[in-house]
Image: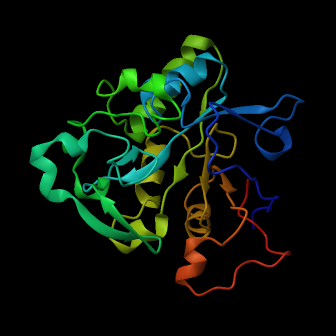
């Protein structure tokens, strides 16, 4: 039985370029905080692009944080949400006009274009754009220039930048809507574990922390791989897997997956 440690709490809606997490909650054992490039340097480059992650590392991030969703062919890519009309130029592509649909994601009706309806090759024809142009207007200068990266490309960047800067750059991926992806036959856990194993990132000592707002997928991952896991929580509500299971939610004595 693995030791259970306290929950790590990160703000799910933060717009800052980086987040400093108390050392005791993550990986370092000295007095310095661990700095996480949340979605990359999202205040300076469109979020979840290799340029955003690269700049976050350049300004001191210890970890880069990709949100992970699945393509139609089961490849994990970095997007804030699986609905991509706000983060790519998909709406300008006439060849994809017929793929605009309405789906129910975690109990909420959402209309747009979804990564799970595109192969990786098709997604690679799109280009990223700034999700919040009214908040980060200077980022719009990069609209149409940057690709949607895969998890493998994010790991490749972390390894290359680790060599270049002479320090270890970790990855802090978040699985987005794992219950939803499980229900449509594109579970996130198996491809995530395959990629991590392919890159030799399998042990608790490795610079990898997998995070989620749901619990069932973290418990599943706990049996599949030995990297660190982090349970995210909101100020209100409960994990969506609890909603699906009609579970009233954790009590104050509830124990989180390992960190």
In the displayed structure image, the side of residue 223 where residue 152 appears, left or right: left
Q: Is residue 214 above or below residue 137?
A: below
Extreme residue toward the left, this view: 95
* Quadrant where the N terminus is found in the figure: bottom right
Residue 38 at x, y percent in the picture = 60, 37
Q: Is residue 238 above or below residue 79?
A: below
Q: Is residue 157 among the parts visible in the rendering?
A: no
At horizontal 64% and vertical 24% (from top left) the residue drawn is: 168
Q: Is residue 191 above or below residue 239?
A: above
Please identify the quarter of the rendering in which residue 231 is found.
bottom right
At horizontal 69% and vertical 49% (from top left) the residue drawn is: 11
Please identify the quarter of the rendering in which residue 221 is found.
bottom right
At horizontal 31% and vertical 62% (from top left) the residue drawn is: 111
Residue 194 at x, y percent in the picture = 43, 50
Q: Is residue 237 among the parts visible in the rendering?
A: yes
Total numbered labels placed on residues in the image: 0
Residue 217 at x, y percent in the picture = 55, 66
At horizontal 31% and vertical 53% (from top left) the residue drawn is: 115
């Amino acid at each position: 039985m693995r030791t259970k440690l306290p929950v790590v709490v990160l703000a799910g809606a933060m717009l800052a370029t980086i987040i400093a997490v108390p050392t005791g909650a993550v990986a370092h054992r000295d007095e310095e905080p661990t700095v996480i490039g949340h979605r990359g340097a999202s205040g300076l480059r469109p979020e979840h692009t290799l340029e955003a992650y690269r700049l976050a590392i350049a300004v001191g991030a210890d970890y880069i944080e990709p949100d992970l969703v699945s393509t139609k062919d089961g490849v994990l890519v970095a997007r804030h949400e699986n609905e991509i009309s706000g983060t790519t130029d998909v709406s300008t592509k006439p060849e994809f006009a017929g793929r605009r649909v309405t789906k129910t994601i975690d109990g909420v009706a959402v209309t747009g274009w979804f990564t799970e309806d595109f192969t990786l090759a098709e997604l690679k024809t799109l280009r990223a754009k700034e999700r919040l142009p009214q908040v980060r207007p200077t980022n719009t200068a990069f609209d149409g220039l940057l690709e949607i990266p895969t998890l493998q490309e994010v790991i490749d960047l972390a390894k290359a930048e680790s060599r270049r800067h002479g320090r270890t750059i970790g990855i802090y991926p978040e699985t987005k809507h794992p219950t939803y992806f499980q229900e449509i036959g594109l579970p996130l856990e198996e491809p995530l574990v395959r990629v991590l194993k392919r890159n030799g990132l399998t042990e608790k000592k490795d610079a990898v922390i997998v995070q989620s707002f749901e619990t069932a997928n973290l418990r599943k991952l706990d049996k599949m791989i030995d990297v660190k896991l982090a349970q995210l929580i909101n100020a209100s509500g409960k994990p969506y897997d609890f909603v699906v299971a009609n579970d009233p939610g954790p009590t104050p004595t509830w124990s989180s997956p390992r960190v």
